[in-house]
Image: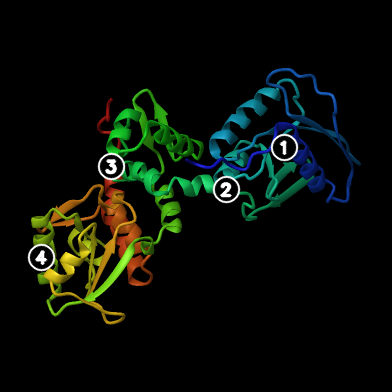
Amino acid sequence: MLKSSYILKPDELVSKAEGKLREALQSLPFIESVSFETEIAPVPGGPDFIALLRTSQGQRTIIGEVKNQGQPRFARAAINQLLRLRQQYPNAYPVFIAPYVSPDSADILSAQGVGYLDLAGNCLLSFDTIFIRIQGVPNPFPQRRDLKSIFSPKSSRILRVLLNSPPTPWKVENLRQQAGVSIGLVATVRKILLDREWATEDKAGLVLKRPRSILDEWSSDYSYHRNEIFEYYSIEGMSDLETKLGVFCGQRGIKFALTMFSGAARVAPHTRFNRVFAYIDDKLEDVRDQLDLKAVDSGSNIMILKPYDTGVFYGVKFHENLPVVSPVQLYLDLRSYKGRGEEAAEFILKEVLEKIWSQGRTTTNEK
């Protein structure tokens, strides 16, 4: 179950927002006072707070919209609300405040002439002779737990389905069936993708909008060391060893797929390698004994990964008669394999994944 974000009660959040705004404005020497209207009529759709700013040039009004999340979806909702309120407060400066305003949200807000401020300390307040801009303060709240949780084994099965396909609409039920997870989990991941505007949704279904952003976040959280790793040495050549692995696992019904450089050499060859990299799900002792593999602490020429989740096998395809993990899994594994692995991962991204994503909304995954 996904954990909730950093949540404050509405009154507590507004109080903290007012305090943070007061602190930012009073840092300017020409600000004489900052006060807040304490009695705002509880009109639906009204501002969350009204600040009265007094300077040597006169008084200025600030209207504020406060939300518990600062991702793009919430920022856009706040912009719409604040711009509507400008009809009631024509000379007021609109400000959005949240526990943390993401960089994407900051760009959206500033493009619409709406100021922002978060409890972490990032802000943009630009009106009259006032300009305060602070960027790059990291998110100190556990909001990122929600983001990391979509990369958990079961949640990431949903991402595998979406990222390994062209950006076509997916109905929730079909996505659930493809990923092999519950409807509730699909709904939760869907909400996170929409909140961050990594996906859009219409009557046709859910469509990835920014697959690269998702993959960047996932790769920063991922390591192939999540898997159980076995290092062996064989006197066989790389090609012969891969073939024998494929034949033996195929005969015994053992899940097997090449990954890292072994997989990349078949999907988008561009580099040489001197080790075999493969996922094997079961009966590793049988594989070891049949192929006469010797366990070693160093100098191995075959790395076998026992997967942390069977989701790594989603999207496996045969290349040169051997199964290879999906381009997404290849990218993740290579990206976390420092040095040449990062270079190979970028090659997979450019030559395979971006071409898949560029195919566009050609079909609808109905159900």
- Asked if 126 appears above or below 175 in the picture, the reply is below
In the rendered image, residue 250, in percent from the top left (x then y), is placed at 11, 56
Q: Find disc 2 in the rendering and name its residue.
A: 103
**Quadrant of the image occupied by residue 299:** bottom left
Amino acid type for the residue under numbered disc 4? Thr
Q: Nearer the viewer, mark 1 or mark 2?
A: 1
Task: Give SS at disc 1.
Answer: helix
Indicate the amino acid at tag 2: Pro
Residue pictured at 30% horizontal, 38% vertical? 180
Q: Nearer the viewer, mark 2 or mark 3?
A: 3
Question: What residue sits right under mark 3 in the picture?
Answer: 165
- The answer to whether residue 336 is left or right of residue 113 is left
Tell me which label, 3 or 4, sits earlier in the chain.
3
Q: Residue at 27% across / 48% down in the picture?
A: 355
- Work out how far the residue at label 3 is from the one at label 4, CA to CA, in angstroms: 28 Å
**Which mark sits nearer the N-terminus, 2 or 3?**
2
* Local crowd size for mark 1, using a 10 Å CA cut-off: few (<14), some (14–19), many (≥20): some
The residue closer to the viewer here, 209 or 173, is: 173
CA–CA distance between discs 2 and 3? 27 Å
Q: Which residue is mark 1?
A: 13
Q: Residue 279 — which label?
A: none
Confirm whether residue 205 shows in the render: yes
Q: CA distance from mark 1 to mark 2?
A: 21 Å
Point out residue 59 in the picture as x, y percentages from the top left corner: 87, 34
